[in-house]
Amino acid sequence: MTIQGRRQYLWRAVDQDGDVLDILVQPRRDRRAAKRFFRKLLKGQGSEPRRLVTDKLRSYGAAHRTVMPSVIHDTTRYSNNRAEVSHQPTRQRERQMRRFKSAAQAQRFLSVHGVIPNLFRVGRHLLRPADHRMLRARSFLVWSAETCA
C-alpha cells in the first residue's frame, strides 16, 4: 500500500483456520523487518508455531533461521493462499476509508479492525445449523459487551 507517496508493506500472520493473529505495517521488506515481525508475533502468541508458511521471499528464510530455527518453514506453491486471501477485507476497508493518511494510523486501525472478523467467522461448514446460530448469537453478545452497545 502507498501512504503519503511512500510504499508501506503489510505483514500479516494467519493461523490454520484463517484467523488473523497479528498485523504489522513497515516501510521495508528485508530481513530486519521480517525478524521484527516474527518477534512481535511470538511475543503476542507466547509459543512457537509448529509450521511457518510463507512465500518465497528470501528475507523470511533469513529471519526464520535466527528467530525460530526449530520451526518447519514451508514455502511450497499455493500453501500461503490462506494468508493471501485474508488481505481482501483489509483492501476493501482501505478503499472505503479512501486510503490511510499515515503508517501509524494504518497500524492502529489494522491492529484493531484486522482481528474483528475472527469473532464472527465460526466455520459454518463444520457445524450443524443450530450450533452455527448459537455461536453467531454468542459472537454478537461478545461484540455488544465489548462495544458497550
Image: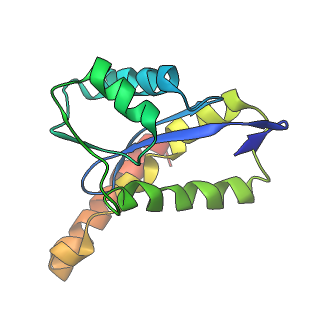
Image mark count: 0
Q: Residue 34 location, x and y as percent?
A: 45, 28
Please name the colour scheme applied to the rendered image: rainbow
- In front of the other: 127 or 53: 53
Name the residue: 36% across, 55% down: 80
Q: Quadrant of residue 127?
A: bottom left
Residue 116 position (above or below residue 37) = below
Residue 73 relative to residue 84: left or right: left
Residue 55 position (above or below residue 72) = below
Q: Residue 87 location, x and y as percent?
A: 52, 55
Name the residue: 15% across, 38% down: 50
Q: Quadrant of residue 38?
A: top left
- In front of the other: 119 or 76: 76
Q: Residue 59 location, x and y as percent?
A: 45, 31
Residue 92 in view: yes
Residue 41 in view: no
